Image: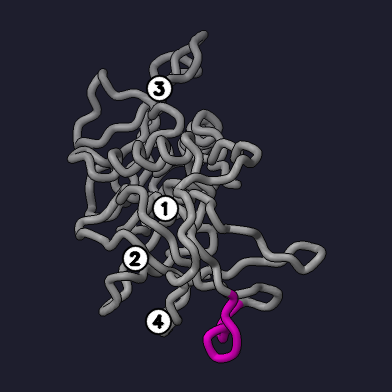
Amino acid sequence: MAVATALLIPSASAQPAIAQQAPATAPAPAPFYADIADLVLRSPIVLDSVIRSAVKLRGEQALGAPPGMVRLYVEADLVALVRGTDAVPGRLGWIIDVAPDARGKLPNWRKQRVLVFARPVAGRANQVQLTGPTAQLRWSAAADMLTRRIIAETIATDAPPRITGIGNAFHVAGALPGSGETQIFLQTEGRRPVSLNVIRAPGEEPRWAVALTEIVDEAAAPPAPDTLLWYRLACGLPDALPAAAITALSPQERRAAAQDYRFILNALGPCRRG
């Protein structure tokens, strides 16, 4: 759990220096896209670091730790600044809450290479604040690559906006039985246009697409899995069309729009998190 204010922590830098190489351990499992995207989107700083020391805090310095958790002050050597607009020192500290194992032992973080998702601490250039309880990850090539890819997606000029709700949904039945088109307009941060479209034709699989402009053209397509647009939809859309979005439709049109919306959700797949 991140804490709201920085603490005055005695420096652990007097301990012997260690090599910037993590000990041999089992490979970290491949991260889920949504887990890393959650962290990237709320973290202005991302660090690739090797931990030098982890000191258990006691007394007033440990106040605020969740029940059953132990609060540590970590010092680490910077390997790379993955994300950040300002220069950072070569050695940084932060606070993290960890759970002891069944024997009461704490994880041994010394020499471990980690990815850290954080925000700056005002007035303390050598400290950062974690942006969540899972914001310190054991480094792996897969996690590093995915983090950098998501960062690039978020700063692209055409990055999709955050979905805040559903506006209106419309359905128009086609001339032939079983044909029709549904269009669903989404509410977004910054009021940028995003719409979902489903077209059904007799004897064919339904086709759907997402458009990021006011006009839906033939080039519109579903988002590729594990991309920022997929994440915005799969992790941001509600489980069903809200009643307010379909009040202007007839009962038959409502059923068709709801069916097409469910088709879209099934095509997106679940927003998996670890």
Question: Residue type at mark 2?
Answer: Arg
Front tag of 2 and 1: 1
Q: CA distance from mark 2 to mark 1?
A: 15 Å
Q: CA distance from mark 2 to mark 4?
A: 12 Å
The mark found on residue 244 in the picture is none
In percent of width and height, residue 76 lies at 43, 60
Q: Is residue 62 above or below residue 73?
A: below
Please give left or right for residue 269 compared with residue 13 in the image. Answer: right
Q: Secondary structure at mark 4?
A: loop
Residue range corresponding to the magenta coloring? 56-65
Please give left or right for residue 56 compared with residue 68 in the image. Answer: left
* Res. 185 in view: yes
In percent of width and height, residue 56 lies at 59, 75
Q: Residue at x 32, y 38 (%)?
A: 195
The mark found on residue 119 in the picture is 2
Question: Residue type at mark 3?
Answer: Ile
Question: Badge 3 is on which residue?
Answer: 199
The mark found on residue 5 in the picture is 4
Q: Are marks 4 and 1 in contact (CB under 8 Å)?
A: no
Disc nearer the start of the sequence (3/4): 4
Q: Quadrant of residue 213?
A: top left
Q: Which of 97 and 222 lies nearest the eye of the viewer? A: 97
In percent of width and height, residue 160 lies at 29, 42
Residue 58 included in the magenta stretch of the image? yes
